[in-house]
Each structure stands twice: as C-alpha cells, then as structure tokens.
C-alpha cells in the first residue's frame, strides 16, 4: 500500500485527508500523490446552434487558482518527511481519480466527498474514507471487518491486508439474520495465512445492520471499519446496497471501502 492518492480541493475536510495520507505514507514507507482536478467540460458555455465554448479568460483564471493551490500545498508539505508529488489534471474529480487509480494502492478521501459513492464503486483501488474531524493518524489500534460472505467483502478483506497487519487487534463482525447465515471462519482462516490473527463476532442485529456494525465497532474500540461496497451504475444512476449507503451516511469511524 505504498502508492497513495489524495484528491485535493477547497473543502473543510482537506486537512484531515492530507494528514492521514502523510501518516499512512510514514508507516508503510509510501509515496503520496496529491491530485488537483478541474472539470473544464463542466465549465463549457453551450452555443445556441450546438457546440460549446470556454472563454480563455475563464480557463486562465481556473488554471491560476489550481497553480496557487498546488504552490501553497507544496510549501506546506516541503518540511514533511514523506515523498510526494502534486499533479494538476484537466478532468473531473471522478475521472481524474479513476485514471490515477490504475497505479494507486489506496485513495484517501472523506465521507462527505460528493462523488464518494461513484469513486468507491467505479475504481478498482480501495478507498479510505474519513468522517469529518476524524483524521486517521494512528494505524495500530483495533480494526473491524464487516463480513457478509459476499465478493465485495472478500475484496475489501484482501485490499485491507496492509492495514490489518498494522492493527493491534482484528475483529471480523458478521450480523446474524433470520434467513441468512454468513460464517466468517473462512475469512479468519485467510487472514491467518497472512500472519493476521482475527477474532470472529457473530452479533444479533440491534436496529439496522449498519447501526449494529457501527455500535459493535465502537464497543471494540475500533479505529477502522473494513467493508465491501455493494453497488453498480446503471444508466448513470448509482445504486448502492442499503448497508453500504447507511454506513457511508452515518459512520463516525474511518471506512476502508472496496467494491
């Protein structure tokens, strides 16, 4: 997990993302790419007879703003003991992240990222999503794996191995339901083959599954929840599974997401 991507914008959660990306790079001896993406296509002015134009002045203004942001970030990061680079791409947020994700081990973003669902479902790399005001600066605390036996959960389990190796304790949590049972022994066995000891918890639902997972994680003192994101894009409308969407909406614990 040495190639880390951190999208950059002007939101209030940027500092948490930057600090988390740097902290992760330190513990894994990694490199962080900070990406500034500008969607010029969305700035286009449509002509009455078809086609679109973008004024040179508008382009220059946006480019100057991006360059100032990059310069400010570089000055801030220069004293840090982490290798990094800053790239400015002429693309939308999702498209820029998707292109960079081909050579990225993990994407660090925020739970309030407007395009989080599209990124989590649309890219192959795992996504580390942070609640507002909760930077993940310590990686050696307990971690919870939300397990339902599905392909997405298995993908998330594999993707999270570098972080689970750092965790002081790993808990595999599966929520019992009347009609289904998802034994987690196979997941624990897989982790053991990679040198990670995990404790399995089969818990009864208390309210929604998402609420049960988060409450269990809090009770275990977890600083990370690993979960698969069930969803797909159809006719450009993103459809997420209920548990995935609920945890994205409510979690106060950082999430490691994989599709």
Image: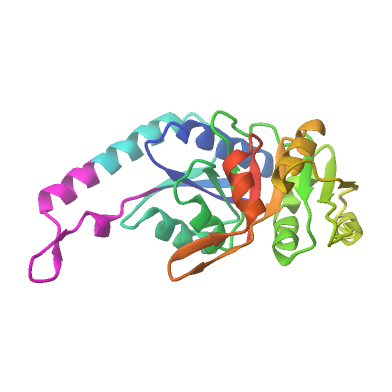
Image position, residue 63 (x, y; %): 23, 47
Snapshot quadrant of residue 178: bottom right
Image position, residue 23 (x, y; %): 61, 35
Q: What color scheme is it? A: rainbow
Whether residue 13 appears in this view of the structure is yes
Snapshot quadrant of residue 249: top right
Whether residue 1 appears in this view of the structure is no
**Figure label count:** 0
47 relative to 137 in the view: left or right:
left
Residue 169's place in the image compared with 5, above or below, is above
- Return the residue nearer the eye: 181 or 18: 181
Picture residue at 64% right of the left edge, 57% below the top: 229
- Return the residue nearer the eye: 200 or 238: 238
| First to last magenta residue range | 36-64
Picture residue at 80% right of the left edge, 38% below the top: 216
Picture residue at 52% right of the left edge, 37% below the top: 17
Snapshot quadrant of residue 236: bottom left
Residue 252's place in the image compared with 105, above or below, is above
- Return the residue nearer the eye: 192 or 221: 221
Picture residue at 85% right of the left edge, 39% below the top: 169
Image position, residue 1 (x, y; %): 65, 52
Asked whether 44 falls inside the magenta stretch, the response is yes
State the quadrant of the C terminus.
Answer: bottom right
Image position, residue 152 (x, y; %): 69, 62
- Return the residue nearer the eye: 186 or 212: 212
Asked whether 244 falls inside the magenta stretch, the response is no
96 relative to 17 in the view: left or right:
left
153 relative to 75 in the view: left or right:
right
77 relative to 88 in the view: left or right:
right
Residue 239's place in the image compared with 246, above or below, is below
């Amino acid at each position: 997990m040495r190639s880390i991507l951190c999208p950059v914008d002007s939101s209030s959660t940027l500092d948490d993302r930057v600090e988390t990306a740097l902290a992760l790079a330190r513990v894994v001896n990694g490199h962080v790419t900070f990406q500034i993406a500008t969607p010029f296509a969305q700035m286009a002015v449509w002509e009455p007879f078809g086609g679109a134009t973008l004024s040179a002045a508008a382009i220059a203004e946006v480019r100057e703003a991006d360059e100032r942001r990059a310069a400010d970030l570089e000055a801030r990061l220069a004293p840090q003991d982490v290798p990094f680079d800053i790239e400015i791409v002429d693309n939308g947020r999702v498209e820029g992240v998707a292109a960079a994700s081909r050579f990225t081990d993990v994407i660090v973003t925020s739970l309030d990222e407007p395009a989080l669902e599209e990124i989590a479902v649309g890219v192959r790399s795992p996504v580390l999503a942070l609640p507002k005001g909760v930077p993940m600066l310590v990686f050696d605390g307990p971690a919870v794996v939300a397990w339902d036996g599905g392909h997405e959960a298995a993908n998330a389990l594999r993707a999270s191995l570098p972080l689970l190796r750092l965790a002081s304790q790993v808990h595999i949590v599966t929520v019992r339901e009347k009609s289904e049972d998802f034994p987690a022994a196979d997941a624990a066995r897989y982790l053991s083959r990679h040198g990670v000891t995990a404790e399995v918890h089969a818990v009864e639902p208390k309210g929604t599954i998402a609420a049960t997972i988060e409450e269990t994680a809090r009770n275990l003192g977890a600083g990370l929840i690993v979960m698969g994101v069930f969803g797909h894009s159809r006719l450009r409308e993103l459809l997420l599974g209920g548990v995935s969407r609920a945890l994205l909406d409510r979690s106060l614990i950082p999430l490691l997401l994989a599709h």
